[in-house]
Image: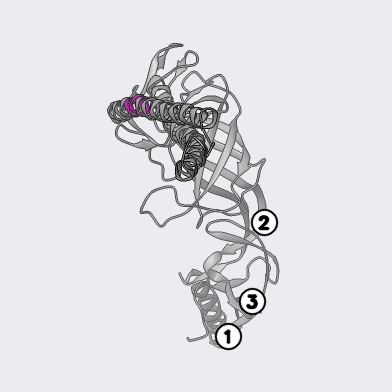
Amino acid sequence: MRSLILLCPLLLAGCSSESTIENPLNYQVKTMDFETLVPAKGYLAAATATAVNSPVGSRGPQTLAWLAPEYSVVKKGDVIVRFEGERLERERQDLNNQLAITNEDILGKKTDLTAEKAVLGYDLSSVAQEKEFSQNYNIDDERIRSKLDIIDSAQNTEFLIAKEQFLGWKNERFSNSSAGEMALLNMQEQQQQQKIGLVTNNLSQLEVTAPHDGLLTYQADWRGEKPKAGQTLWPGEKIAELPDTSVMELKLFVSEREAIDLAVGQTVTFKLNANAEQQFSGVISDVAPFPQSIKRGDPQKFYQLKASVAHNDAAFLPGLKLTASIAVHNSQPLLAIPIQAVFKEQNADFVYVYQQGKYQKTPVVLGKRSISHVEVISGLTEQNIVSLVDQAGV
């Protein structure tokens, strides 16, 4: 009977310990294979490609009228982009009309100036003749003419001299002003001719042809939107690419909430959405320094990454969608606990360890992290039991 009484507390203690471990709100610390895999989505792209841009020499923005279908095979010289030219044709017609008006103004001004100059020349010649006659044939002998007549003749000569000087000044002033008026009209003519030349040049660049054979892929902007008919493009703006499919790479997007310790050189495994049975591998070659939005109106932000492909495959085509996993930390045995078992106080990490029937706040030093677990460098040992909920208010 006494043995039975002694055995009961031991059984109760064992049951209590066992029930503590099996409590779904507790976790028993153990060594586990720790591997951090970060999920990513993206698409295949060529490592090198020939850019197809809107004409650099165009004046102002242009409107897309037509594009060759994406992923179509094009030959060198094929038209792949065509811009709307109706507005430019109207502009050129307006400029030609303005130029015709300016040419008429120039012709009319030349006629008017020629006539005015002829009148001034005639007046100047007449006054010169009258002055010469007055000077050469003036009789100032008082025996022949009266003193009043002599004075009147002298005054007439002086008047003719002054009139000749005035007409000379007027002729010179007219020449200068007429030269200025003609220069202004000629400048207007040159400006209109230059504008017509620019518009004509734009009209000659309404079609963009393929620089070489290739597979046409559209260029998405920072919002992920691809060019389409009716869209306005600025001179030199990228429209599409003719990729070199002999060397492919991955364009990956990782949610900022799942981005953990991303770095160049990490291994990537991926599957094409069109062929989910086959798995391929690659290596991260570039990581964006900060996340950004990739879809208009979507507040989520993503880190953009590039990855080289280990081996090219015949199934690889630019634009094919894929899902990938990035091995941030390779698999190795580590002491790890769930992330929800870790709490913070004054920037220090701690856990609640179950000891002697109650939870003890225990500081810990943490290491590598995955989406669900974190490595414990110090503060815990195997078989410790930690709480998955905050015990402060319990």
**Residue 383 higher or lower than 301, as above or below:** below
Among all residues in the image, which is located at the extreme front? 143
Residue at left offset 45%, top offset 41%: 149
- Tell me where residue 344 sits by quadrant: bottom right
- Extent of the magenta region: 103-109
Q: Could you tell me which secondary element the residue under label 2 belongs to?
A: strand
Q: Could you tell me which secondary element the residue under label 1 belongs to?
A: helix
Residue at left offset 50%, top offset 48%: 254
Which of the two labelled residues, at mark 1 and mark 2, occupies the earlier sequence position?
1
> Can you identify the residue that label 1 sits on?
6
In the image: residue 97, left or right of residue 274: left
> Can you identify the residue that label 2 sits on?
334
**Residue 82 higher or lower than 171, as above or below:** above
Give how far apart the Cα atoms at labels 1 and 2 are.
40 Å
Residue at left offset 41%, top offset 14%: 74
Q: Please check the rendered image and state whether residue 126 is part of the magenta-colored stretch, yes or no.
A: no
Q: Nearer the viewer, residue 359 or 126?
A: 126
The rendered magenta stretch, by its main secondary structure, is classed as helix
> Can you identify the residue that label 3 sits on?
347
Q: How many marks on residues?
A: 3
In the image: residue 376, left or right of residue 385: right
Query: Nearer the observer, disc 3 or disc 1?
Result: 3
The answer to whether one can see residue 240 in this image is no
**Amino acid identity at mark 3:** Asn
The answer to whether one can see residue 308 in this image is yes
